[in-house]
């Protein structure tokens, strides 16, 4: 390879014979690893948040300061898990599903799939209780988990991570806690993206039979892990270079806007419902 | 006039990520056999998106995409055999090279494609050796791709798709981050590849790459349209 300007290409590269792929059991990668990494991308924070609201409901909720939404979410989660009367849980589930139905189909899938999987797993875990004489336990558990996860994912997938972080500020958490959360959220998002890109790259190059299935699988997992690790390291270096002194400034956002008041009224109404159904009123 | 059928044909293609974020607006261009085309334009104008669309990673909202005489749509991509044949014939190198390297060593990385194609191990070895020689990366054979420098990684990423002997190479900013010598290697290779009758579509910000491979320029503007 002396003179690059007059390269002689190997004959196989310029030959004209067509490659005919054979059908094979290549399903392995496609079905397993790709699905696994695909799941990871479901958890991407702010996945739907490229400067647009996914639905009317999200646009309306988008006007509510994020910290108010986080507080509201917390209240809802506590109520859902504390409710002894399943009516309240079903009410929340109905609300969540209505909000979800207003989103475009891909957003619904992204939100529903991890929630449904988690719900199915928790139902399985409760099967022994059913055998021990509480036949409705698995269903109750599954419904609770489904509702809670839909609530959480509804917020995390529709709000960019930087707004989530800014919202934490309003809770007067210490700078260190916010920094850690910020880095963790960002990493999760980057990891989701990395997994997606690797998945695509593999799909593009999987043009035939994958003879060593486990190796490719391990490769993807390994690179994702390395990537996360390196990213954390590079980020801390970059922060040091830019004069990071241990103080982490996050601009706080305004809290009591009109839409926040409407939102809080809605939450208050839900809490009243909860108390009423639990027989405390 | 009986022109040969174009290798790539984007016909009034529009695409947006989600509802609002338009990335391609009524984009049309083509690449002829034995032609090199360079897609130029400011950051964010939709160059990478155009490449993703013609590789079947995204699907056009409207308009049609044809590559090597086949319509690139959901149907093609869901047909396992057709999709495999398509991916062998169209070599795509991502803008961010490390997102497409996942094997333990550079040698295995380059061998991945040929092995997938079911070639004999001698043939695989021959191809790997040839490609490594072309891209001047033989000394990296046993290194882990993940720990290479950015420029080395980029050359490896290109070598990985070249080893599948594609008919069309689609490269997203192939010379960004390369030193002069590596740039020469890549440019020299692309020139010979085109001279051998194959087609190349690159996006780039480097005018010298355009000149070096004698590419026809298709320019996009920040409104995601092709400027005529
Ligand atoms: N995954 C994505 N989701 C949403 N928007 C995206 C995504 N990727 C790119 N975009 C947007 O699409 C537009 C075109 O991007 P891209 O094709 O990467 O530009 P270029 O490669 O020309 O710099 C940009 O405005 C970018 O912000
Ligand atoms: Mg780009």
Image (cartoon, coloured by chain):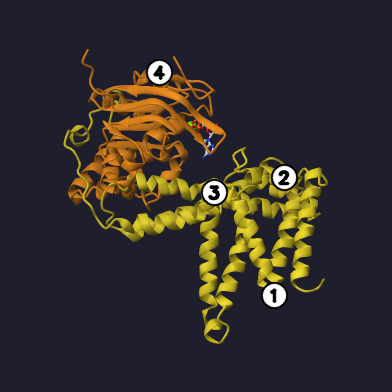
Circle 4/circle 2 CB separation < 8 Å: no
**CA distance for labels 4 and 2:** 44 Å
Nearer the observer: mark 4 or 3; the answer is 3
Mark 1, residues whose alpha carbon is within 10 Å: few (<14), some, or many (≥20)? few
Q: Which of marks 2 and 1 precedes in the sequence?
A: 1
Disc ID at residue A222: none
Number of residue marks: 4
**Residue marked by disc 3:** A107
**Residue marked by disc 2:** A244
Answer with the quarter of the image where residue A137 lies: bottom right
Q: Which of marks 3 and 2 precedes in the sequence?
A: 3
* B91 is higher (above) or lower (below) than A214: above
**CA distance for labels 4 and 1:** 68 Å
Q: Are marks 4 and 2 on the same chain?
A: no
Mark 3, residues whose alpha carbon is within 10 Å: few (<14), some, or many (≥20)? many
Answer with the quarter of the image where residue B211 lies: top left
Q: Quadrant of the C terminus of chain A?
A: bottom right
Chain letter of disc 3 in the image: A
Image position, residue B153 (x, y; %): 42, 41
**CA distance for labels 3 and 1:** 31 Å
Can you tell which chain is drawn orange?
Answer: B
* B67 is higher (above) or lower (below) than B114: above
Q: Name the side, left or right, on which B95 lies relative to B213.
A: right
Q: Is mark 2 within 8 Å of ligand 1?
A: no
Can you name the residue that lies furthest to the top here?
B1
* B30 is higher (above) or lower (below) than B108: above
Residue at figure coordinates x 81%, y 49% from the top left: A261
Residue B136 seen in the figure: no
Disc ID at residue B217: 4
Residue at figure coordinates x 33%, y 42% from the top left: B75
**Residue marked by disc 1:** A84
Image position, residue A164 (x, y; %): 69, 49
């Amino acid at each position: 390879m002396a003179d690059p300007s007059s390269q002689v290409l190997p004959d196989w590269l310029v030959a004209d014979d067509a490659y005919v792929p054979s059908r094979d059991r290549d399903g392995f990668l496609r079905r397993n690893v790709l699905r696994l990494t695909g799941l990871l991308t479901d958890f991407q924070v702010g996945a739907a948040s490229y400067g647009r609201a996914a639905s009317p409901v999200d646009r309306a909720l988008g006007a509510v300061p994020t910290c108010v939404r986080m507080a509201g979410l917390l209240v809802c989660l506590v109520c859902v898990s504390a409710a002894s009367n399943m009516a309240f849980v079903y009410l929340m589930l109905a609300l969540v599903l209505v909000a979800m139905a207003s989103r475009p189909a891909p957003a619904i899938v992204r939100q529903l799939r991890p929630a449904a999987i988690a719900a199915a797993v928790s139902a399985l875990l409760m099967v022994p209780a059913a055998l021990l004489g509480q036949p409705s336990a698995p269903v109750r558990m599954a419904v609770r988990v489904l509702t809670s996860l839909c609530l959480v994912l509804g917020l995390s997938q529709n709000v960019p991570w930087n707004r989530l972080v800014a919202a934490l500020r309003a809770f007067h958490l210490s700078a260190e806690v916010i920094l850690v959360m910020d880095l963790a959220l960002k990493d999760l998002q980057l990891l989701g993206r990395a997994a997606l890109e690797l998945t695509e790259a593999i799909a593009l190059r999987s043009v035939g039979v994958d003879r060593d299935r486990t190796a490719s699988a391990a490769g993807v997992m390994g690179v994702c892990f390395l990537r996360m690790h390196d990213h954390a390291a590079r980020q801390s270096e970059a922060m040091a270079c830019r004069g990071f002194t241990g103080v982490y400034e996050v601009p706080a956002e305004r809290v009591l806007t009109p839409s926040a008041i409407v939102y809080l009224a809605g939450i208050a109404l839900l809490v009243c419902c909860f108390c009423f159904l639990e027989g405390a009123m | 006039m009986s022109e040969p059928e174009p290798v790539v044909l984007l016909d009034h293609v529009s695409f947006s990520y989600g509802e609002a974020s338009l990335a391609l607006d009524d984009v049309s261009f083509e690449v002829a056999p034995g032609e090199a085309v360079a897609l130029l334009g400011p950051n964010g104008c939709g160059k990478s998106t155009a490449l993703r669309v013609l590789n079947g990673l995204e699907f056009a909202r409207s308009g049609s995409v044809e590559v090597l005489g086949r319509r690139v749509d959901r149907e093609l991509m869901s047909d396992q055999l057709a999709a495999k044949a398509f991916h062998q014939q169209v070599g795509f190198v991502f803008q961010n090279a490390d997102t497409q390297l996942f094997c333990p060593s550079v040698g295995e990385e380059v061998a991945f494609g040929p092995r997938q194609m079911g070639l004999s191990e001698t043939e695989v070895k021959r191809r790997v050796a040839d490609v490594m020689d072309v891209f001047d990366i033989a000394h990296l054979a046993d290194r882990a791709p993940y720990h290479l420098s950015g420029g080395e990684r980029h050359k490896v990423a290109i070598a990985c798709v070249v080893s599948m002997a594609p008919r069309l190479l689609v490269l997203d900013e192939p010379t960004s981050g390369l030193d002069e010598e590596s740039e020469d290697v890549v440019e020299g290779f692309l020139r010979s590849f085109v001279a051998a009758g194959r087609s190349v579509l690159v996006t780039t910000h480097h005018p010298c790459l355009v000149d070096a491979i004698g590419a026809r320029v298709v320019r996009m503007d920040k409104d995601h349209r092709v400027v005529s």
